[in-house]
Image (cartoon, coloured by chain):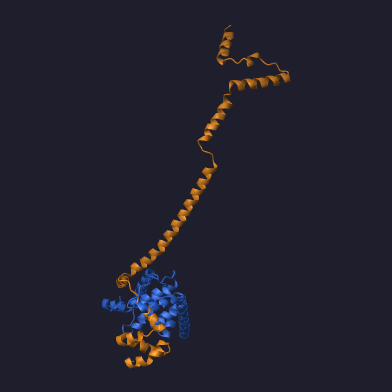
Chain colours: A blue, B orange
Amino acid sequence: MPYKEEQIKLLIFRYQQSAFAFVLYLIGGDQDKAYDICAASFAEAMRAGFPLEHEEVFLNRLVSIAVEKIRNVKTIPNFDVIELLEISGAEKGQLLIVLKALQTLDFEQKAPLLLRYQINLSYRDIGAVMRISEGNARIKTAQARAQLEKESERILNNS
Amino acid sequence: MNCEDIKKKLKPFLDDLLAEEEYKAFCGHINICGKCSSYVRSIGSLSNQLWKLGKVKVPEDLSSTIMYKLAHPEQEARASKYILSKKHIIAGFILASLIIALFVGIHYLRTRQQPKRDDTPIVTTEVIHKIESPSESEARSLIKQLETIAAKLGIAVNDKTTNVEPENENIVDEEERDGD
């Protein structure tokens, strides 16, 4: 193990929620599979080592490993069981609409969207994770965002 | 980037129009400044809603599982091998079940088509018994048939053949003649 236990625990504490959420939404809501992939990705990313002063390197590697693992997993989407924290009742209603809209997107649309707005990666990093160019990452994210907005509106109008 | 810059750059941030370096600096600041973070995230934009969706409940033992996997990399490799072998076991079990089902099906069809084994020897012994020892009436009808055939052919038939006598008596008669 290249780092001390305290450093590792701190990293896990800092990134486990965003990483778990990212995997969970990208995989389609399967908590057990998200747990396994998340734990395995953390372990693999940490074993590879990185300079501690650049935590973003670790985060990029972590999500890259997770994305590659999720590509090979097939699941049935089910977001009903996801438990959201620190969210008030009124806000939860809006978020559930976005969640339903997110469910309609496929892997290639969801991944750049979540990498951008949940993990807050730059387009260059999104391109590296998705194995596409920076410009392509920008376009794909914008398209996915437009699609998500459209779906959210449709769901809101139907409800 | 400071708190004042965050207020200025908020609109382009929410519309995703910031340059890469500005975006990084913006995110870097709101990650460490609680006041700015709550201010930015309070605005109901789509990007903020996606960020809020990230606030999911994490399984309590996730960190301990990661620590365990880090400390025991060989266990992880073994686990993945186990998953592979588990798949093979399931496939083998299904295959074995199919083979068993096939054999049972063939056996069932065979037993259904064939008569019961218990009936066969009875029929066979009865037939054999009838052939080996015909009844008296059957014997007489056979003799009569032979007599008619012989009469047609002009062959004289011995009277002894018509009068069926015990074989032992004939033997005694022959012995008496030899003695005489």
Viewer-nearest residue: A148 or A32: A148
- Above or below: residue B97 compared with residue B133: below
Which quadrant of the figure has residue A68? Answer: bottom left
Identified at 27% across, 76% down, the residue is A5
Q: Position of residue A126 (x, y in %)?
A: 42, 82
Q: Residue at x 35, y 83 (%)?
A: A56
Q: Compared with residue B122, is residue A84 higher up or lower down, i.e. above or below? A: below
Is B39 rendered above or below residue A81? below
Is residue B121 in sight in this rendering? Answer: yes
State left or right for residue B60 relative to residue B174: left
Q: Position of residue A11 (x, y in %)?
A: 31, 79
> Where on the picture, by quarter, is residue A82?
bottom left
Q: Quadrant of the N terminus of chain A?
A: bottom left
Seen from this angle, which residue lies furthest top?
Answer: B180
**Residue A118 in view (yes/no):** no
Say left or right for A72 vs B157.
left
- Comparing A153 with A111, the one in front is A153
